[in-house]
Image (cartoon, rainbow, N blue to C red):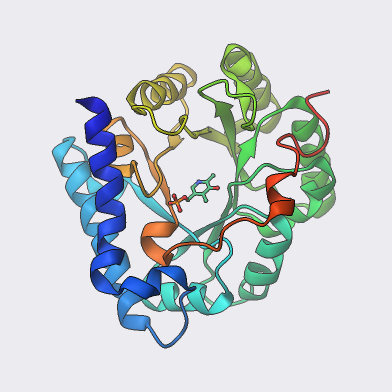
Amino acid sequence: MRGALALTARAQAMSFWSMSLQSYADTSLSDQQPDLMSAALANIRARIDAAARRAGRDPQTVTLVAVSKTHGPDAVAAARRAGQSVFGENKVQEALTKFLPLRDEADPPTLHLIGGLQTNKAREAVRVADVIESLDRPRLADALALAAEKEKRLPRLLVQVNVGDEPQKSGIPTREADSFIEMCRHRFGDALCGVMGIPPADVDPDPYFLWLAAAAARHGLPVISMGMSGDFEQAIANGATHVRIGTAIFGARPRPSAAEHSSPSVPDGGYL
Ligand SMILES: *Cc1c(COP(=O)(O)O)cnc(C)c1O
C-alpha cells in the first residue's frame, strides 16, 4: 500500500508535464515559455499548500526550493518572473555563474547549495550560497569555518544525513549523525539550523522522513529539508520545512554523461 502511494505521488509529479506539452519536458525552459513556467510553479505551490493543510500545517511553513541545476539563466529568470525567489544548485561552479551576478540586484534570489561539496570548493560555496545543505563530514566543517572567516560571510548550514546509509550517497552516516550535529552546533551556533536527507530510491520514504524529523526535534533545529519531485507531499506530511523540486518545475534534465556516472561519490576522498 505505502509503496503504491509513493508511486502515485511520483506519477503525479510527472503528469503535469506530460499533460501540458509532451516534448517540452525533454528541453530546458527558455523565455519563450513563461506561461508554462508560471503554470508549473502554480501547480506545485497548490500541491504544497494542499499537502500542508492535509497535515494540519500552515502552508507558509513550507519553503519551495526550485532546483534549477542544469537549466540556464533564462529558466531562473522565468521562474523569478513567476514569483519564485528560492533556488537550489548542486554544483558550485554552475551556482557561481548563474547566481553571483544576481547578488547585487535589489531583491536577489536566495540560493541553496544542495550537492556534495569538495573541501577545495568551500570558499566559493561560502561566497555564493545563502544556505549550504550538504555539510556532511568534519573536514568539510573545518573548510567551511575557515572559508567563512576569510569571506566574512557565513551561510546557514544544514547537516546532510545519509538516511539510508547507502554507500553511493553522500551524507553523514546515521550512527554518527547526533555527535556530528552537536559538534557543528557548537562550532557554528545558530547558523547550523537543520538537517537534509535523500531517502533510498524505490522504497517507501516515510521511515526516512520520520528519522530526519526526529533528529531535527532532538537537536531543536528548525529546518528539515526533505522531499523532491516524486515524494514532496509525503515529506510535508512528515514535517518537511523545505522541499527541493527540480523536474516538476523545470522539466527533465539532460541525462548525466558517462563521465558524471563514473565520478566518485565522495568527492574529495573520504571523511578523514
Ligand atoms: C536534483 C536534486 C533535487 C531535485 O530533484 P527532482 O527529482 O528533479 O525534483 C533535490 N535534491 C537534491 C539534493 C538534488 O540533487
Image position of 99 with respect to 218: above or below: below
In this view, the residue in front, 41 or 130, is: 41
Image position of 65 with respect to 145: above or below: below
Q: Quadrant of residue 250?
A: bottom left
The C terminus - image quarter: top right
Q: Quadrant of residue 257?
A: bottom right
Residue at 72 percent of width and 27 percent of height: 137
Q: Residue placed farthest to the bottom in the image?
A: 32
Image position of 41 with respect to 32: above or below: above
In the picture provided, is 139 more to the left or to the right than 12?
Answer: right
In this view, the residue in front, 146 or 269, is: 269
Image position of 46 with respect to 149: above or below: below
Residue at 66 percent of width and 30 percent of height: 136
In the picture provided, is 258 more to the left or to the right than 236?
Answer: right
Q: Position of residue 236 (x, y in %)?
A: 29, 38
Q: Residue placed farthest to the top in the image?
A: 175
Q: Residue placed farthest to the front in the image?
A: 258
Q: What is the tally of numbered marks visible in this picture?
A: 0
Residue at 26 percent of width and 43 percent of height: 9
Q: Position of residue 264 (x, y in %)?
A: 75, 38
Q: Position of residue 50 (x, y in %)?
A: 17, 48
The N terminus - image quarter: top left
Residue at 64 percent of width and 32 percent of height: 170
In this view, the residue in front, 122 or 188, is: 122
Q: Position of residue 208 (x, y in %)?
A: 41, 24
In the picture provided, is 201 more to the left or to the right than 175?
Answer: left
